[in-house]
Amino acid sequence: MRPLLACFDGVTKVPEQEQKRRDLAVYTLGFLQVPYIRRMLKIAGWQVRFGPFSRQAEAIGVWGRKPLAKRGFAAAKRRNLSVISVEDAFLRSNFPGPSTALFGLIIDETGIYFDASNSSDMENILNGDGLDDPQLLLRAQKGIAFLMANGLSKYNPVPKAHGVLPKAGYVLVVDQTVGDASINCGNASAESFRKMLAAARAENPNKPIIIRTHPAVESGKKSGHYSLADCDQNTVLQTGQINPWDLLEGADAVYCVTSQLGFEAILAGHTPRIFGMPFYAGWGLSKDEQRLERRVKTLTVEQLFAGAMLEYPVWIDGFQGRRCSFEEAAQFCQAKAKMAWNALPQSVALGMSSWKTPQISKFLGYDSTPPIFAKDLQSALQHAKKNDKRLVVWASKVTLAMEAKITTAKQPFWRMEDGFLRSAGLGAELTPADSMVLDDIGIYYDATRPSRLEQLISASVDLPDYALQRAVDLREKIVDAGVTKYNLDADAVDIPTTNKTIILVPGQVEDDASIRLGTKVVSTNIGLLAATRKANPDAFILYKPHPDVVAGLRPGQVENPLELADFLVENGAVPEILAQVDAVWTMTSLLGFEALLRGVSVTCLGMPFYGGWGFTDDQGQTCERRLARPELAGLIHAALIDYPLYLDPVSKRAISPEGLVERLHLRQNRRGPRLRVLAKLQRKLARFAYMWR
């Protein structure tokens, strides 16, 4: 595991060797007006200075080959300095535009990848001898699979299976925006698009042809090379946003000029017909109309990906302020895309505590329209029906009567609940949740019915190796960092030395929905303690009451717990305790899942989401639906990667689970002054908590 980084005042320190920077003189305001560009270049080792005031500059920076770049080239010639070309990396953001931060940059000291008139760092990498390393090619293979499985591209406005997909068997012709620098720099022109469409028709008589419109054209911001005038009985313009990987999957042939979609077509198994000279042409993986003598090697798909995605870009972890690997950047990209995709259907929210609404708005309205918070079911249904919105209800507030009314109204709805890596602080202390789950089937803690998580766990038996390895790495990161659900500062625990089997019994909040819906025989903390002692008369039993109960905010207090337990732990850190015990006995506590992550055996007297799959000794009840026998990595992937959404507690932007683990380990969170004051007031009025929960 990569060491967790030191932090000061919420900003991670960059290691000393990464702090030595060279001055980069720029002559266009874009470098200076977009803060994250300066910040990313700084992380990459360049300090941006405005050209006229940069006497110590070691190079001139230009953005791609935009017209304004001529200023930079002229200055470089005048000052006898080299030119550094900067561009977006191939995983950019959810949407085009300077307002969305990037995942990486191209910083090319030779040329730029899309300019075929000159060599570039990428071309030199692809022509070189460094792409035969088996480990590098294995990373490339896994990286391709990750992008395809998650539907990730340069821009990510919609997920896979979104919209009306065309019937498979068509020819895909890829349009680009007029004036795109990669066209002219790629030895192409508007005439290339005319020739491309003519060739597609001639070489595929009577086959349907779909012209893929660039997203910026569909949004009305730019114009493309094709219009309705180019359509006929076999040729149509793509309408509506469709994930590019879906388009590639259904295509029999792909035609491109210089679009990045041609690169992705190669990754998807196509041999695209290319009418320009983009970076991916000339390596034996495409049918090229042109030749470029400098490109002398024949590459495999994995070698092309390794050079273009693993070696060439500078990938940036903007959360911790450091360079990162492609894999980490792709995970951040997936997290942001997943959050944005989740917010595509506009929401009407019901049953949300008022103090949670700002955070819930970020989860349900990420980069989109904020949700409407309804006061009652009737108004929620009216809003949802009238505006064709999604109804989202806080899971524990759903009653049988409410569900019946929603069903009668024929309104689909989603349940919302905190995730399993929640925060650095208690929800009962009004600490906003950094992870939440949305379930369109049930909810994870309700064992009486199926849930989306249950389906994900069942399906995890078919996860590819790279996904299982990610779960293994995440588990290692969580264990090494000592991260749990709430991540409270706690006293050291010195458990008495004993030769007996040590069993930890975690108390729970007794009015919690997971008790009501996940237990049948034992549903109280005193009952759990009694059952544990009866089954283990000679064991050394530790009892740890729930933090909310200790704080006096929720019910579940056990009078005289030491009549059944041998040792009481009220404020100990969960990871430290689990490292000293042999087993956990629980009803449905998440601590049982945290014990499984750390290799501790777990006995369940209820049916939590992690029970019934073969990982636990289930003595309370069974679940006939849970027939699959996944690996523990599959359970982790379903529960911590696939199921939740994650929000960075510092930047309030989407974050990967791996990124959040670092935040939680470093206790990096932000709770506004209003919530801090309310939390103090709440402690004084704890016996009236039912009024606002």
Image (cartoon, grey):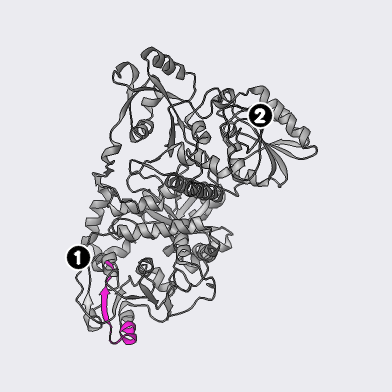
Give the image location of residue 406, x and y in percent. Answer: 54, 61
For label 2, count other residues whose C-alpha is less than 10 Å away and answer few (under 14), some (14-19) or many (20+).
Answer: many
Give the image location of residue 411, x and y in percent. Answer: 56, 58
Residue 276 figure quarter: top right
Give the image location of residue 178, x and y in percent. Answer: 59, 24
Q: On the picture, is 524 further left or further right than 94?
A: left
Q: Is residue 233 above or below residue 614?
A: above
Residue at image position (31%, 59%) is 480
Q: On the picture, is 144 further left or further right than 667?
A: right
Q: Amino acid at mark 2?
A: Phe
Viewport quadrant of the C terminus? bottom left
For label 1, count other residues whose C-alpha is less than 10 Å away and answer few (under 14), some (14-19) or many (20+).
Answer: few
Residue 501 colored in magenta in the image: no
User: Could you say which is closer to the camera, residue 682 or residue 168?
Assistant: 168
Q: Secondary structure at mark 1?
A: loop
Q: Amino acid at mark 1?
A: Ala
Q: Is residue 579 above or below residue 10?
A: below
Residue at image position (19%, 76%) is 496
What range is drawn magenta here?
Answer: 530-547
Viewport quadrant of the N terminus? bottom left
Query: Going by the picture, which residue comes out furthest to the top?
Result: 78
Q: Secondary structure at mark 2?
A: loop
Query: Which residue does the numbered mark 1 point to in the structure image?
Result: 492
Q: CA distance from mark 1 to mark 2?
A: 67 Å
Q: Is residue 417 visible?
A: no
Query: Going by the picture, which residue comes out furthest to the right?
Result: 206
Give the image location of residue 367, x and y in percent. Answer: 45, 42
Query: Which residue does the numbered mark 2 point to in the structure image?
Result: 275
